[in-house]
């Protein structure tokens, strides 16, 4: 009887999990004995790390030919429920039909989404760059502002959240607004961060460089304050300051996809499922968790994978390999990713490239930007629809640096 692997999600983790599973099955010569299905709304890889940018043509590469080349079936829909005891998932097809898929091994790779706290007006009035559709909606809004009468509120953008995404979004914003309103337009761009410092999770080492870039890009920084209420005409900060603006971009905080909550056992504060060294959910040995839904140790020194593309790609390869290896009699592969780098885009200033968990600065300005460009236009993109080339990259021992 054919054994079944079901992967939920075709992001960085899910796509690589499906290819790595196909590679393991192929290595064992058991292509006719194992069926691999990936479930997601569309056979596309959404390039989420680039959604702070301004051109969206290359942000959703079609991976249907790649999946076909490696022998993976795509099912268009979303997984709605996981039944660990009966080894089934319920799928809602994009056409509205409901299906139950049995599995021998299930890989949860449904990623993360922006967390929206209970701030008055946030859901109604704020924009974000978390998903392709929301980044496109922000872009359309900014371009539509150009036909409205010029006011301070029209020409002001407030980015709420001064973390990784907030910094990339806000440093890009002044030149983005000038491209829309004209080079001489009087624009105002503000980043608001609740912590006492900008980039609180990035640590102290790169901070002076980030602060220099923010200043040079003309971004106003407000720390130790948050957005307390948002309306169509502006934002009121927790300090009481009022900023008139028609554009608030919310970037503060991601949470694991809600499906992760359906897996029993421990979850971290982001909703991620605790994984064992082989990326199995600790509560269900036939379920693997990967990418942004997984809490996994990267080394023996207490570091854990961040919600990042850098980790999702390797986590995906390991989870997919192990899901198949167990079925076809190959050794499983422990997850390990001791090398950690960060490459933060800082708009026209350039970018900063750091190494290590303490983020030692290695490259800045145009040298950093050159690395960021490589990452954003090459390294994170899917491989060509060539079975051998894709399998070579899907080796779980293949570690990428960014
Ligand atoms: C603006 C921005 C900038 C970023 N910058 C960086 C960066 O510079 N470096 C970096 O490493 N990371 C960065 N990240 C984070 C990175 O994008 C994520 O960590 C990465 O996308 C996680 O990969 P994933 O495969 O786990 O999830 P995702 O890429 O989110 O993919 C999830 C997949 O699951 C699908 N899905 C969702 N729900 C279901 C369901 N119920 N059933 C089936 N399928 C489902 C989705 O359609 C998608 O295909 C950034 C993110 C953003 C938003």
Image (tube, helix red, strand yellow):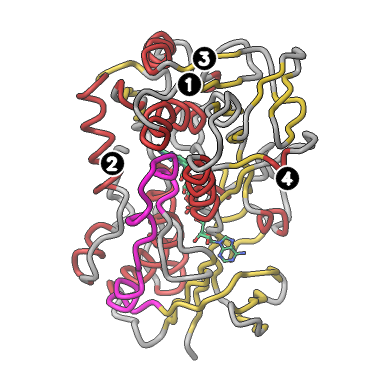
Taking the magenta stretch, the answer to whether it contains residue 292 is no
Rate crowding at label 1 as few (under 14), some (14 to 19) or many (20 or more) other CA atoms within 10 Å. Answer: some
Precedes in sequence: disc 3 or disc 2 = 3
Q: Position of residue 387 (x, y in %)?
A: 23, 72
Q: Is mark 1 within 8 Å of ligand 1?
A: no
Gap between marks 4 and 2 measured at Cα: 34 Å
Seen at 40% across and 34% down, the residue is 176
Magenta residues?
A: 47-72
Gap between marks 4 and 1 measured at Cα: 30 Å
Q: Residue beneath label 2, please?
A: 375
Q: Do the residues labelled 4 and 3 touch (CB within 8 Å)?
A: no
Q: Describe the element under mark 1 as helix, strand or loop.
A: helix
Q: Position of residue 82 (x, y in %)?
A: 68, 68
Seen at 42% across and 70% down, the residue is 43
Q: Residue beneath label 4, please?
A: 124
Precedes in sequence: disc 4 or disc 3 = 4
Q: Describe the element under mark 4 as helix, strand or loop.
A: helix
Q: Is 265 located above or below residue 332 in the figure?
A: above
């Amino acid at each position: 009887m054919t054994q079944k692997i079901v992967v939920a999600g075709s992001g960085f983790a899910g796509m690589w999990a499906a290819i790595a599973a196909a590679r393991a099955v192929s290595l064992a010569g058991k292509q006719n004995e194992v069926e691999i299905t990936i479930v997601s709304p569309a056979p596309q890889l959404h390039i989420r790390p680039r959604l702070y940018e301004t051109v969206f043509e290359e942000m959703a590469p079609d991976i249907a030919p790649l999946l076909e080349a490696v022998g993976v079936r795509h099912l268009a829909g979303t997984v709605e429920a996981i039944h660990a005891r009966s080894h089934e998932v319920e799928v809602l097809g994009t056409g509205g039909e409901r299906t139950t898929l049995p599995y021998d091994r299930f890989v949860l790779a449904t990623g993360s989404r922006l967390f929206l706290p209970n701030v008055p007006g946030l859901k109604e009035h704020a924009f974000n760059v978390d998903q392709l559709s929301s980044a496109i909606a922000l872009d359309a809004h900014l371009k539509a502002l150009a036909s409205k009468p010029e006011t301070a509120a029209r020409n002001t953008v407030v980015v709420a959240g001064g973390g990784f995404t907030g910094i990339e979004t806000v440093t890009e914003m002044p030149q983005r607004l000038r491209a829309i309103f004209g080079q001489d337009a009087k624009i105002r761009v503000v980043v608001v961060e609740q912590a006492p410092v900008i980039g609180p999770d990035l640590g102290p080492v790169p901070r002076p460089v980030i602060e220099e870039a923010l200043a040079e890009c003309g971004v106003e920084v407000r720390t130790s304050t948050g957005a307390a209420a948002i309306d169509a005409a502006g934002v009121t900060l927790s300090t009481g300051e009022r900023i008139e603006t028609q554009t608030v971009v919310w970037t503060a905080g991601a949470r694991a996809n809600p499906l992760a909550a359906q897996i029993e056992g421990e979850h971290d504060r982001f909703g991620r499922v605790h994984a064992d060294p082989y990326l199995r959910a600790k509560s269900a040995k036939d379920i693997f968790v990967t990418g942004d839904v997984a809490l996994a140790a990267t080394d023996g020194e207490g570091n854990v994978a961040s919600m990042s593309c850098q980790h999702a790609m390797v986590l995906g390869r390991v989870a997919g390999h192990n899901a198949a290896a167990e079925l076809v009699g190959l050794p499983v592969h422990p997850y390990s990713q001791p090398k950690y780098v960060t490459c933060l885009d800082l708009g026209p200033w350039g970018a900063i490239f750091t190494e290590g968990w303490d983020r030692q600065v290695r490259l800045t300005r145009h040298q950093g930007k050159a690395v960021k460009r490589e990452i954003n236009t090459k390294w994170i993109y899917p491989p060509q629809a060539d079975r051998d080339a894709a399998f070579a990259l899907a080796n779980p021992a293949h570690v990428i640096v960014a």
